[in-house]
Image (cartoon, rainbow, N blue to C red):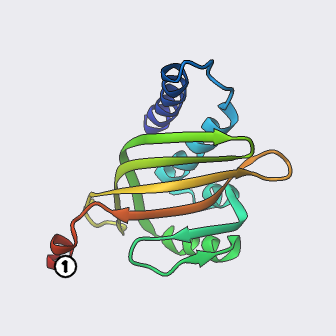
């Protein structure tokens, strides 16, 4: 169900942005499929599918953690995290821009990340994804940066 919602949302926003700018919608179907595949992999807990969508020089800038650089380091993190539950709900693509071989999305969503068997704990957050085409023309995630919507004074109380 989430797969269909994510795919529909990405297509709808792409068309809406193009129409509202008075332009014909560009054919970004390969990027839209890639973004949908990324969120589908999260929903299924499939770390290897997410890893396949990473650029070799990917940079991951997690909230409250140290920056990671390179596919090997980020892959290790994804694999370690596969023993936990990571889900996203209420994904909204706030903005998407494509220019040649580069694209970015600004996203808003709720996520839960916890041990298996524990209750979901939903947190409001946002991220920026920068996508780039590799030499074979496939879209890959180049930069992933996110942070919490929880105000610092509330965060410190938790």
- Quadrant position of the N terminus in the picture: top left
Going by the image, does 117 lie left or right of 39? left
Q: Which residue is drawn at 64% across and 51% down?
A: 131
Rendered image quadrant of residue 11: top right
Q: Is residue 122 above or below residue 67?
A: above
Circle 1 residues within 10 Å: few <14, some 14–19, many ≥20: few
Q: In this view, does 62 lie above or below 88?
A: below
Residue 91 screen position, x and y as percent: 39, 43
> How many labels sit on residues?
1
Q: In this view, does 142 lie above or below 153?
A: above
Depth order, front residue of 120/138: 138
- Quadrant position of the C terminus in the picture: bottom left
Q: What element carries label 1?
A: helix
Query: Which residue in the structure is indicated by mark 1?
Result: 156
Going by the image, does 11 lie left or right of 135? left
Task: Name the residue furthest right.
Answer: 136
Q: Can residue 75 be seen in this view?
A: yes
Residue 130 screen position, x and y as percent: 60, 54
Going by the image, does 93 lie left or right of 71? left
Rendered image quadrant of residue 157: bottom left
Q: Residue at x 43, y 38 (%)?
A: 2
Q: Can residue 78 be seen in this view?
A: no
Q: Is residue 148 above or below residue 72?
A: above
Q: Which residue is drawn at 42% across and 60% down?
A: 86
Residue 57 screen position, x and y as percent: 72, 68
Q: Residue at x 50, y 51 (%)?
A: 44
Task: Name the residue furthest front.
Answer: 22
Residue 60 screen position, x and y as percent: 56, 69
Task: Name the residue furthest bottom.
Answer: 66
């Amino acid at each position: 169900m989430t797969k269909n919602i994510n795919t529909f949302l990405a297509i709808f926003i792409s068309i809406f942005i193009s129409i509202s700018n008075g332009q014909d919608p560009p054919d970004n179907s390969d990027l839209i499929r890639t973004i949908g595949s990324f969120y589908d992999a999260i929903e299924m807990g499939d770390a290897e599918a997410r890893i396949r969508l990473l650029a070799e020089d990917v940079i991951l800038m997690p909230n409250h953690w140290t920056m990671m650089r390179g596919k090997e380091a980020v892959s290790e993190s994804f694999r370690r995290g596969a023993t936990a539950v990571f889900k996203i709900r209420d994904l909204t693509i706030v903005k998407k821009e494509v220019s040649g071989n580069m694209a970015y999305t600004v996203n808003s969503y709720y996520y839960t990340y916890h041990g298996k068997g524990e209750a979901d704990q939903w947190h409001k957050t946002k991220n920026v994804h920068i996508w780039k085409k590799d030499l074979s023309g496939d879209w890959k995630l180049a930069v992933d940066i996110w942070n919490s919507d929880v105000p610092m004074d509330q965060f410190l109380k938790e």
